[in-house]
Amino acid sequence: MKKLFYVLLLAVFAFSIGVSTADAAWTTGFTTGKKVCLYTSSTLLASQTGDANIFYTLAAGESLATNDTITITLSGGAKFSTSAPLLYFYPAPVDATIVAYGGSVLAAVGSASGLTTANFAVAGNAPVGVGILLNSTNAGATGIFDLTAVTGSVDVTIKAVKTGSGLTAFEKVLSTTTAIAAVNKYAFLTPAACDAAGIVSKSDVADVSAATGGPYSKFTTASPNTTSGTITSAAYRNYGTANGTSPAGGPISSKKLLWTISGDLGGIASIAANGGAVTGSNSAGVQTGGTANQFLIATGNLLAYASNTGNLAADGLLDPTPQFIINGTTAQAARGFNVAIDILADGTTWAAHTVQATTPIYSITRNGVSFVTNSVGPRNTIKITERSGSLPTAGGAILITAWDVSGNSLAEASGNAALTIHNNETVSITGTALAARFTGTPMKYEFAVQTSNAVGTNVKTSTDGVSTATTVYTNTPGAL
């Protein structure tokens, strides 16, 4: 009988949570505010222990009798695991420092595995002052908690129901008690970010007046006419064992940390990884065919990948510091690039997850003014008017590139005179003269004007020379 009584007392103590004048009955909650690292594998999360057991002392009006029921409820997405929760009874006064289990044991009624609640049937009588302990640390055994679905802080609620009448004797929530420090009121705190990323985006200007290779094929940054862009940052920090996270994720194996760069990579010769310790790879982190300290640009020129060359220690930092290198011959369109960082499934240590969602990391802008037309024939005339009024005495260049109907870049014919425009001047180029500047049959023309403000028009005259139709091209003033 005494054993049953102890068991009863233990059950009551473990799950009674104060939100009323009986709040002081909570002797202690958890002691370190352990945070859940959701990015570790479900194997590690399935059975977690608390940092300390929960103690409760029956307060005035909370005495229980045989066949009363105690229900323990977990919040925040936590469930009970296959290791059954137990209640241990201690006669008053309760010593909150107790770590060795003693007294009688009360087991949950039925299986609590996979449920957010555990029910305990009281055996015997439990008067006011009896202390009860919940085996949340489980004395070194596998934990009673399943945290695989946790989305927030894990709270504990206790509800006691009287047998026969079905009336609630008390119902209390641990987090609302005023007797315990705020950090200790939850079994587990809001999930920790077990990793972090820092993206630093940069931008470079493609130069209309590149000395070689045509307009917009070189950058103005670093030094005149360079093909090397500004170094960016895509840092990853592994907080696997820091900040009291649970469980400690540990190091990340080689080829399991993946950087993905996306965007139009046409005209990009390479993407250097100046930070080192990464190798070009495919989307699965496989480095076959990749080069150390360089991203691997995939077929189609829309994606590039790199993964960590060696293991990344817990709490380690790795930043490939991507740098875009253009090929010096392709006219660079104004466009942007993004980066994403992922952890790939790594045995039983890390579950696959995204560290950094797709984020802008680099952009190419263009100076000068440009416009494109695909409708120029013998009866058309292209007119370009300078509007800034701030050009030097020598004026600014008008550079033209052309493509045929299949998208092939056409070479310039020999003997073409350079085209120059001066302040507020209008330069006219007939369709016949325009076509003669290239070998082949042009379909699309792109005009780049070395000024900060200009307007382009396409004037078409009727066969009888009486009427004209004019198209005005939207231009993008730059800062040249």
Image (cartoon, rainbow, N blue to C red):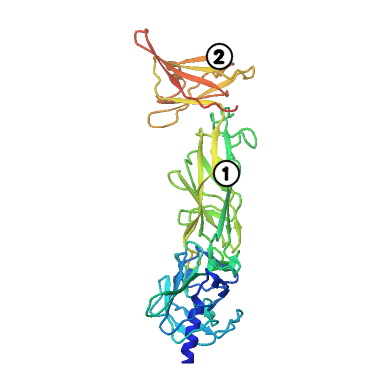
In this rendering, the answer to whether 177 lies above or below 476 is below
Report the residue at 49% width, 62% height from top. Answer: 152
Q: Which residue is mark 1?
A: 201
Give x and y (percent) for residue 185: 56, 68
The answer to which quarter of the image holds residue 114 is bottom left
Three-letter amino acid code of the residue under disc 2:
Glu
The residue where tag 2 is placed is: 425
Mark 2 to mark 1: distance in Å?
39 Å
Q: Nearer the viewer, residue 263 or 285?
A: 263
Dot label at residue 34: none
Give the structural element (helix, strand or loop) at label 1: loop
Q: Position of residue 459 (x, y in %)?
A: 42, 15
Residue at the (52%, 74%) spot, across then down: 49
Tell me the amino acid under the disc marked 1.
Ser
Q: Is residue 283 above or below residue 14?
A: above
Along the line of sight, the residue nearer the viewer: 104 or 337: 104
- In the rendered image, residue 408, in percent from the top left (x then y), is placed at 42, 32
Quadrant including the C terminus: top right
- Kindly tell me whether residue 253 is visible in this rendering: no
Position of residue 368 in the picture relative to residue 262 (left or right): right
Q: Position of residue 288 (x, y in %)?
A: 48, 56
Q: Nearer the viewer, residue 119 or 404?
A: 119
Compared with 262, 154 (above or below) is below
- Circle 1 packing at 10 Å, graded few (<14), some (14-19), many (20+), is some
The quarter holding residue 119 reads: bottom left
* Residue 49 higher or lower than 242, as above or below: below
Bin the neighbour count of mark 2 within 10 Å (Cα to Cα): few under 14, some 14-19, many 20 and up.
some
Instruction: Look at the numbered disc 2 and give the secondary structure of its residue.
Output: loop
Q: In front here: 278 or 73? A: 73
- Mark 2 in CB contact with mark 1 (< 8 angstroms): no
Query: In the image, is 206 to the left or to the right of 117?
Result: right
